[in-house]
Amino acid sequence: MSRSHFPPDFVWGVAAASYQIEGAAYEGLKGPSVWDEFVKKEGAIANRDTGDTACDHFHRYEEDVAIMSELGYPVYRLSINWPRVIPTGTGKVYTEGLDFYDRLIDTLLAKNITPYVTLFHWEYPQALQEKGGWLNPDSPKWFAEFTQVIVDKLSDRVHNWITINEPQCFLVLGHYDGVHAPGLKMPVKDILAMAHHVFIAHGEAVKVIRSSARTKPHIGLAMVGSTFIPFTDTPEDIEAARQALFGFHGRSEGLWSAGLWFDPMLLGKYPEAYYRAYGDQIPDIRPEDLQTMAQPIDFLGLNIYTSPQVRKGPGGQPEIVPYKTGMPRAHNGWPVTPKSLYWGPRFYYERYKLPIYITENGLANQDWVSLDGKVHDPQRIDYLRRYLLELDRAIADGVNVKGYLQWSILDNFEWAEGYDKRFGLIYVDFETQKRTVKDSARWYANVIKTNGEALFEGI
């Protein structure tokens, strides 16, 4: 008798993003992205690393797809580098850049790997950034034009679409904290205006896909799946965790509120607390904007790694409960919190009633090639097992989870952290570009093969 609650049609796979793996930053007529420019800034990236070469996936994609196939990975989530396709962001299409993705999709399908295509995973064209970027009211039109180009080229073979990845990160980290591209520190008022434009851009992209796709599309978002773990399973602490997730606690802290980032696109309205928190800093919100941004979608993607724990505090307000000293942590310092993959999907499913995909989850580890020529990463195996067991529990409790895409297929350029933090199932020697399949990659292959049953071995 099966102990796994993963349904027979559960979607298993892996994920990556173009700037983090492709390299070929200046290949042919490709235009620069904000990340191509940001990595040149002194002190912006650890070890002065850049994505100029990264994993050289642009030239080695056939090898990488062959490895995925050998491991039996059924799905690959990739992203399109916008200025590789339209060098100046709008206007003339660079055919050779677009053809790369055409070949990549064909190569995946030839190996029976289903592509999930993310249209925007932070590779914003520098030419458009110089026109105001997301602060420009025309930015949704620019994104819709780009979407049209990709859909026209790929939708005869691509069914699964993700419009935008983690607006919380590329806006707050990139335009408020200044630690990601384009490295700006803008006022809250501008962040809220840009968020509004991003939401409209998402809606316009959904309209393009729905109206133009040549095969029936399956459309979603990939969002930072911020969550909070209740300190106890009491109703009071569960409600405190829910409030911490969707509420607004102070003006700048509210910039990470899930209510701000999810409600407009999924419910067609901003939360009441948004208006109370930001008052005169709120952009002009027209009813037609809300209608556009709330286009019906088919699934909600959540990128979940770690969570604080909270309880009901004084006055009924959520209160963070510090984790104990010496708790398990990833190499990038994030606490290892498997219950994130129970409470996150549960809270978001309860609120938005959409099928859930975990579009990212994984461990930053300090891997290396051992004397036997292999990469042994038992911590990653243990991490993934703990998290996936919690995801199984969420499914058992009625959460409609449809898929899980592990981050990441390859060790890659981890944004401001450079190449120090290895998230991959496949080890990459960034000098030689040699790939080495890690123990975790084969373990994960068995989890997929058994549809989660392997998670329960020995327990």
Image (cartoon, grey):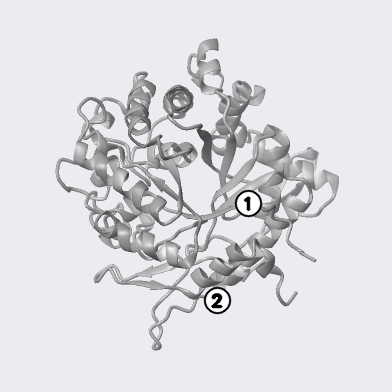
- Residue holding disc 1: 10
Amino acid identity at mark 2: Pro
> Circle 2 sits in a helix, a strand or a loop, which is it?
helix
Q: Amino acid at mark 1?
A: Phe
Determine the secondary structure under disc 1.
Answer: loop
Q: Are marks 2 and 1 in contact (CB under 8 Å)?
A: no
Q: Position of residue 369 (x, y in %)?
A: 39, 80
Whether 320 is drawn above or below 381: the answer is above
Residue lying furthest left: 28
Tell me the quadrant of the picture where the N terminus can be found: bottom right
Instruction: State how far apart marks 2 and 1 are (Cα).
Output: 25 Å
Q: Nearer the viewer, residue 264 or 188?
A: 264
Q: Residue at x 33, y 55 (%)?
A: 21
Residue lying at 65% horizontally and 35% vertically, measured from the top left: 354
In the rendered image, which quarter is residue 381 located in?
Answer: bottom right
Q: Which mark is residue 378?
A: 2
Q: How many other residues sit within 10 Å of disc 2, few (<14), some (14-19) or many (≥20)? A: some
Single out the mark in the foreground, 2 or 1: 1
**Residue 330 in view in this figure:** yes
Please provide percent x and percent y for residue 103.
29, 48
- Which quarter of the figure is the C terminus placed in? bottom right
- At x 53%, y 35%, the residue is 218
